[in-house]
Amino acid sequence: MDLRHLRYFVVVAEEGNITRAAERLHIAQPPLSRQIQQLEEELGVPLLVRGSRPLTLTEAGQFFYAHARQLLSQTRELEAMTRRIGTIERKLSIGFVGSTLYGMLPKVIRRFRSEQNTTELTLHEMTSMEQIRALKEGKIDVGFGRIRHEDPNVRRIVLREERLVVALPSGHALAEGKPVLSLLDIADETLIVFPKAPRPSFADQVLASFHDRGLEPKKIYEARELQVAIGLVAAGEGVAIVPGSVQGLKREDVCYRELEDRNMVSPIILSTRLLDESREIKLLIEMIIRIYEEEKIDYIRY
């Protein structure tokens, strides 16, 4: 058994169809079928239920699929870390969700560039879920996201829980009436959530907050990103729930109100590959803690 067998089987399991799997792998169907048969012969058990549409896995196949995926992921992680260690020039690639730019991330980036000026730093905007994939594929080394996602190959550090606020059009009745709002207060408004895709995302965090309280927004508008959502709020198309740091985006046509429920928070999560103990990542984490302490920002100690 080799890694090729594992990769072939995983793709077949994901596609549920030999023909589509062969197209995805850029090989002919007969050789792919033979490779899967050879794998079953080597293991001595059937992995696929022949004749099922779509193709399904036997109990042994389900077990093998789960562990094959994990092994392939660990292999990609090993390759990425080996390339990092073997590279003479120090590099650090960071993925981030757009909303973190309104908090401390810009200061973190500036400080890191100043203190570690021999390290080449690159930035990539991507969703939290995209960051997980990019970490495992070696495309980034650190991610700053907001979605809690369990993955055995990714280390997750919750840096802090950021309070959420309501963004309203200036002059809105709710903005004039109460300094602090509840979700019930805005349930009859059009709720603008973001990002529209991919999911799960911050949008799902917001919608879950309503559902957990037995509430349902009257109407939901899905925006592509935070900036679009704020623009729609300014245009009077609805209201949005956003991280508190977005208040730093000064606009005369948008105002913000606190939420009375102090449990309405969004985490800022730093993610790295589980086994990556590189010098740059350790220095980055240490520097973030120093900045939080200087700014007197509460952070989750670990």
Image: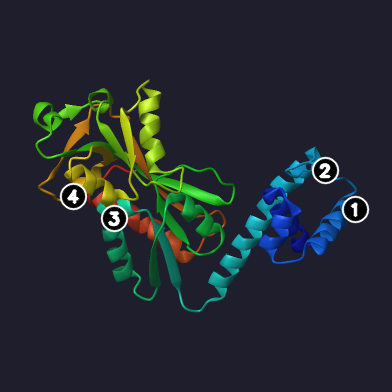
Which circle marks residue 41 in the picture? 1
Image side of residue 174 versus residue 33, left or right:
left
Q: In this rendering, does residue 296 appear at all?
A: no
**In front of the other: 278 or 188:** 188
Q: Are marks 2 and 3 in contact (CB under 8 Å)?
A: no
* Front: mark 1 or 4: 1
Q: Position of residue 279 (x, y in %)?
A: 46, 65
Q: Which residue is mark 3?
A: 101
Q: Which residue is mark 4?
A: 248
Q: Are marks 1 and 4 in contact (CB under 8 Å)?
A: no
Q: Is the residue 233 above or below the residue 178 in the image?
A: below
**In front of the other: 67 or 283:** 67
Q: In this rendering, does residue 97 appear at all?
A: yes
For marks 1 and 4, the one nearer the N-term is 1
How are the residues colored?
Answer: rainbow
**In front of the other: 138 or 92:** 138
Q: Is the residue 212 above or below the residue 170 in the image?
A: above
Which circle marks residue 51 in the picture? 2
Quarter location, residue 45? top right
Q: CA distance from mark 1 to mark 3?
A: 53 Å
**Disc 3 residue type (three-letter):** Leu
Image side of residue 91 versus residue 228, left or right:
right
**Disc 2 residue type (three-letter):** Gly
